[in-house]
Image (cartoon, rainbow, N blue to C red):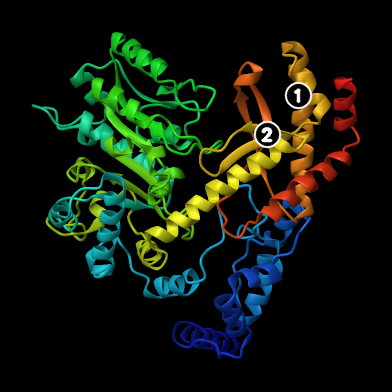
Amino acid sequence: MRATKRIADATQESLHRIFTVAEAPDSTLGLLEQEMSQNLVGFLNNHIVASKNALTDIEQDFINPHIPEQPEFVSDHMHHLLDKLVAQSVHTSSPSFIGHMTSALPSFILPLSKLMVGLNQNLVKVETSKAFTPLERQVLGMMHNLVYQQDDHFYQNWMHSAEHSLGSFCSGGTVANITALWVARNKLLKAEGNFRGVSREGLHCAMRHYGYQDLAILVSDRGHYSLKKSADILGIGQENVIAIPTDEHNKIDCHKLADKCQQLAAQNVKVLAIVGVAGTTETGNIDPLDKMAKIAKQNQCHFHVDAAWGGATLLSNKYRPLLKGIEQADSVTIDAHKQMYVPMGAGLVIFKDPTSVSAIEHHAEYILRKGSKDLGSHTLEGSRPGMAMLVYASLHIISRPGYEMLINQAIEKAEYFAELITQHDDFELITRPELCLLTYRYAPKSVQVLLARNNTEANKSVNLLIGKLTKFIQKRQREDGRSFVSRTRIEVSRYGGEKVIVFRVVLANPLTTKEILQDILQQQCLLAQESENFLPELLRAAK
C-alpha cells in the first residue's frame, strides 16, 4: 500500500510540474525547442534520416497497446520521439520533396503555433474564444474579399453579424466541400408549407415533397474524391456525383456539361450543384469557371468552386485572371495549409451570400444560443483550434505582394521544369503546368518515336511497360531518400484517352532550386538504368 501511495504521489507531483513548470532552458527539451525555433529546416535536416525501413518495420516501434503505468520525464520521452518518430518522418519541408501539396513553413509559424496551442481557444463558442472569434470572422472577411471583392460597407454590415457568417474555418478541403454542399442541399430542399425542410424531415420526405426523382452533383472527371464523400454523407449517393469528361487540357467540357443538365432535367433529376475545379489535384488545371457559372445559373443550381489548391492564386495580380468567374460562385473552398504556407488543418469555405449559412444553423441551450456570435452554430465541426490566428498572422507578415511573389515564382519554376523535361531526350512531358503542378515520365527517345507512330495496340503495350518502369523509378527514388516525386495514373488524350502512369510534381516550396530540379531528372535517369527488366524490355520494343 505504501509503495502504491509513493507511486501515486510521484505521479501527482509529475502531473503538477507538467502543467505548471517548463523544463529548464538548458535541459534536453529546452535545447531542442531552441534549435527548432532558431532554424526549423536545419532541425529537420539534422533529425530526419533518409530511412529505408518499410512501413511494416516502422510499425514495430508502435506496436505496444498498453498505456504506461509509470510516467516518464519529458526529456526522456523526447529522445524516444526523436529516435522512433521524428527520424522516420517524411521530410515534407525538404526542397527536394516535390511530390505532394505540402511545403516548408515560414520561420515565424513555430513560435506562433506554440502561442496558439498554449492559449487553447475553442472556436465553437465565444465563451472559450473571446478574442479569437472576431479575429476568425475578420479572416473570413479578408478571404471573402479576396474572392468576391465587395466594398467596405458590405463587410461592415456582415462580417460580425451574429445571425450570419461569410464562411467557415474547417480542418481541410474535404470538410469545406461537405459544408458547401450541405448548405446547397438544405437551401434547395428548404421548408415550404407543411414541409419543415430536409434538415428536420430527412431526404426521403424532401424528395417526396418536391417531386424530384433524384439529385445530382456534376463535376469534371478530375474532381476531388471528397465530393463523393460529401454525397455519401448527405444521403445523395456516390453514384449521383456525375463525372463530366474533360478536354485535352484537363478542363471540363462545358458542352457536355450543358447536355448532361438537359438530360437529367428530362429524367426529373434535379442538379443540386455544379462544381468547378480551380487547381485539379493531379494536374493543377482550372476549369472555365465563367462558363460553368452561366450553366449553373441557367439550371438554377448551386455553383461551388473547389479551389482548395488554386484559390491562393487570387493573391497574385498577375495570375488572378486564371480564375476568372470564381466571383460568380455561390461558395468557394480554399485550403490555407497549401499555398498560403500555414500548418495542416486550415481549410475554409466562403459563401457569397452571408445569409446562406442559416440553412445549416444549429443551436443548443448550453452553447450556440440564438443571438450569440458563436461560430459553431454555422460549422460542421464543433470544437476547433484557433488556426485562423496563423492565417491572420501570415496575411500580415507575408502580405499580399509577398504571397504574389511566392505564387509567381512557383508557377515560373514549374514552367522552367516543364521546359527542362521537354528538352531532355529521355523524358516526355504529359501535362504542361497551368499552376505549379505538372506530370511527366521517363521515356527514352527511341520509345517516344515509336509512340509517335500512333499504333494503338503497340502503344498500349509500350505504355504498360513505361508504367512499370515509372513505378520502379518512383519507388527507388523514395527509398533512396534524397528526393521525392509522387506518381498517379491519368488519361492522356494523345493516346486516345488511355490511362498511363506518370510522375507528378508540385513546385510550391520556395526553397526548391533549378539545380535541385536538374538533379532530380539526373537521378531518375540513373535509377532507370538499374531496372533489370522493364527498361531492357522497353528498349527492345522500340527497335
Residue 291 visible in the displayed image: yes
Quadrant in which the C terminus is drawn:
top right
Left or right, 373 with respect to 215, comes to left
The Cα atoms of the two marked residues, 1 and 2, are separated by 11 Å
Residue drawn at 27 percent across, 65 percent down: 135
The residue singled out by tag 2 in the image is: 502
- Image coordinates for residue 539, horizontal then vertical, percent: 88, 26
- Residue at image mark 1: 464
Residue 345 visible to the viewer: no
Q: Given the image, on which type of amino acid does mark 1 rest?
A: Leu
Q: Residues within 10 Å of mark 2 (few under 14, many from 20)?
A: many
Rendering quarter of residue 121: bottom left
Q: Quadrant of residue 446?
A: top right
Q: Nearest the camera: 314 or 268? A: 314
Q: Which quarter shows the N terminus?
A: bottom right
Q: Is 349 above or below relative to 94?
A: above
Query: Which sits earlier in the primary sequence, circle 1 or circle 2?
Result: 1
Judged left or right of residue 228, residue 463 is: right
Q: Which mark is residue 508?
A: none
Where residue 476 sits in the image (x, y, percent)? 79, 46
What element does badge 2 sit on? strand
Q: Give the x, y percent position of residue 387.
A: 39, 62
Q: Is residue 540 left or right of residue 436?
A: right
As displayed, is residue 390 above or below residue 515?
Answer: below
Q: Residue at x 32, y 18 (%)?
A: 214
From the top left corner, tell me how far across and down residue 355 is, in percent. 17, 44
Amino acid type, label 2: Val
Q: Residue at x 35, y 64 (%)?
A: 392
Q: Nearer the viewer, residue 434 or 478?
A: 434
Mark 1 vs 2: CB contact within 8 A: no
